[in-house]
Each structure stands twice: as structure tokens, then as C-alpha cells.
Amino acid sequence: MALNPKAAGKGDSECAETGEPLSEGGEADKKSAATSATANQNGDQPGCRDGVMPEQEATERRRSVLADGRCSSSSPLSASRSSEELPRKNFQIPRKTRERKGLYQFLPPESREFEDLVKLISSFYLDASSRGTFSYCKARLIHNELLEKEFIEKRREMKQEGRAEQELAESYCFLFPDKSKLQWICEKGLSVGHCRITTLGNPSVGVYLSKYSDLLQINPFEVGSFGDMIIFKVMRGRIKHIHENMPKNAIESSPKFDCHLSKSANRVTSLLSYRAFELTQQYFFEFAFDEIKARPRHVCPYAVVSFQYKGKEVAASPMTAHRFNTISPEGSRGTFYIYSIFPVPVINLFFLFSTTTVVNLNIP
């Protein structure tokens, strides 16, 4: 058979690259066959070019990759990227600021906070029979960051002065303000000069608050009366007890004290007691470098509650209570508590005494 001249030429050219001379006859074929067998045993690919080219190609590829990396690093686009990436390493995630609350936090009537607030109010009743006579339909907590911060600062200052724990104890007081002043008090706090009471001190240098939540004004509430009551969080600090017959200069505010209370407050045992409202008031003031402050920091508005006075249940006998302030011939003041059979306005005093009975005469 005739051999393929192209195949023979290809084999001759491949073996020529190895540097071996071409022998005559079948020696060249034998040597090439032996060489291929040896390569197969060593795990190499047959053919001299297949064993050498893969290494060269791998080296060239590595060189080309390095060259491309150098070119890309030197390009302006990569420089801009690197400049953008550098600040990111030092970037810090900002803290999430606390969401600022509004002035009021309204409490649903079915919430636990609403119930706790009503219990707080009930715990400050003077008369136990006041339970059930008031209905509370709307409540809202006051979130005034400035006033709360000043309240805490005042407590810290008093603690640094070495005050006793009893002086730093927090309590609650109450105020029934005019409707037009309620918003201002909640925003700016209670300032001096808001009332005209002078029992415990000059109202132009201090503030007056009610001790009891069912004794918010001088005259008793009429059935159906309604309004808004402000609850204050207070610290009484160092207390000075005021006597009724003390001279005016003795009841003036002084830097040594923080609060004035009446010595006769313990006599008030009923809402109808003589001067019950005035004697149960609490007077707060604050000095700063021998000067009075316009707003005591240890008095902070806490909540606003809307209420309505329903009145006490009518007893079996239709008797109506009346309170009268009288002056005896000696000049001492007294109070008559009279229960009238006829629930009509008092017109004729003689007729009233002929049809009524004096129940109590309390002359302090």
C-alpha cells in the first residue's frame, strides 16, 4: 500500500524539532514509536510540541494578567474608584436619634395607664365619700423635656447639699386652673403670681397647689360641674410650718426652706371644714443667689385629667347641707353646718333656724 505523503511529512517535521537525525528505512519510525511509548509511561502527551507549549502558554497568560492589572491600576477610572473607596473605610453609621414626643400623650380609657392615673387621683381624696362623685373621661400625660430636666437637676443639687431622703421624696399636688391658662402652664411651667392666696406666703414669690384632689377650689363643686385638673410632681424639700397668727414678716420666703405648710392643716377632716381649701394648700418657692426664681424647679406638671362632678347620692331623707361662715361678738370666726329639710335657697334666716337643726359648731 502507498503511504500518505502528508502524514509522513508531518511526522518528519515534528520529530525534527527534537533535534534527532532521520535514519533510513524503518529506524526512524521505530525511534519515534519508542519515544512515544516512553512519554506515555511518564504521563506526558504524545508529541514533542504538546509537552512544551502548555507551560509556555501558562507563563504567557500569567504575564498578560499581570500586565492588564498594572494597566487597569494606572487608568484614571481605577484611581477614581480607589479614591471613592478610601473614605468608606472610615465611615461610621450614625446613631438613630430618639423620636421627639409631643407635649401630650393621650391615654385611652381602657388602658392600664389611665386606670393607674385614676387610682393616683383617688388616693389623694380628703373625704372617702368622694369616691364615685367624680367621673374622669380624658387623661393625657405631659412630656416637657425642659421642665423634667430641670426637676432632675434640682433633685441632684439638693442631694449634693446633703438633704435627707424625706426632703427628696416625690409626691403629687393638684391645680384647677382657668381654661385659658392650662396650655401655658403645661408648656412653660407654673410661675409665681398665678393666684391671690396669702395664707402661707406672698403669691408673687411662690406658687400654691392643692394637697387633695377633691378639694380644688374654695366653694364646693355644683352637680354637673366639669373642667381640667393638672397633676404636678413635686418635692417638698425643707418644710416650714406656718401658724395662722404669725406676723407677715415671719411667713416670708427664705433660702433655708423650699415649701410652706399650714400648722392647722391637720384640723381639716372634711370638705366642709372651716377654711378647708386655704389650710390644705402647699406653697412652693425657690431661691437662686438670694433672688427668687419665677418658676420653682421642684414643681413639674405631670398630667392633665378632665373630670365632671356628679355629686353624692341622695340620702333617704331629702336633706341639703349648707355651710355658713359667721363672726362671733368676740371677733373669732366660726362655721355652722346646717341641714335644711327644704332644698331651697336661704332667704329668711329666722325661718331657716326655725325649721332646721344645727349639727356642728366648729370654732377654732
Image (cartoon, helix red, strand yellow):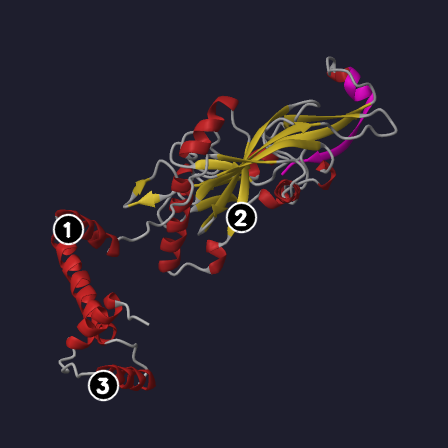
Based on the picture, tell me whether residue 96 belongs to the magenta stretch.
Answer: no
| Residue 168 or residue 29, whichever sits in front | 29
Q: Residues within 10 Å of mark 2 (few under 14, many from 20)?
A: few
Residue 224's x, y, as percent? 69, 22
According to the image, label 1 marks what residue?
79
Secondary structure of residue under mark 3 = helix
Secondary structure of residue under mark 2 = strand
* Contact, mark 1 vs mark 2 (Cβ under 8 Å): no
| Residue 267 or residue 207, whichever sits in front | 207
The relative height of residue 276 versus residue 349 in the rendered view (above or below) is below
Residue 216 falls in image quadrant: top right
Residue 203 falls in image quadrant: top left
Quarter occupied by the C terminus = top right
In front of the other: label 2 or label 3?
3
Q: Name the N-terminal-most of marks 1 and 2.
A: 1
Secondary structure of residue under mark 1 = helix
| Magenta residue span | 351-364
* Contact, mark 1 vs mark 3 (Cβ under 8 Å): no
| Residue 206 or residue 272, whichever sits in front | 206
The relative height of residue 344 versus residue 216 in the rendered view (above or below) is above
Distance from disc 1 to disc 3, alpha carbons, whole Å, reads: 64 Å
Residue 337's x, y, as percent? 73, 30
According to the image, label 3 marks what residue?
27
According to the image, label 2 marks what residue?
171
Q: Residue furthest front?
A: 1
Based on the picture, tell me whether residue 360 belongs to the magenta stretch.
Answer: yes
Q: Is residue 14 visible?
A: yes
Disc 2 residue type (three-letter): Ser
Disc 3 residue type (three-letter): Glu
Q: Residues within 10 Å of mark 1 (few under 14, many from 20)?
A: few
In front of the other: label 1 or label 3?
3
Q: Residue at x 17, y 84 (%)?
A: 23
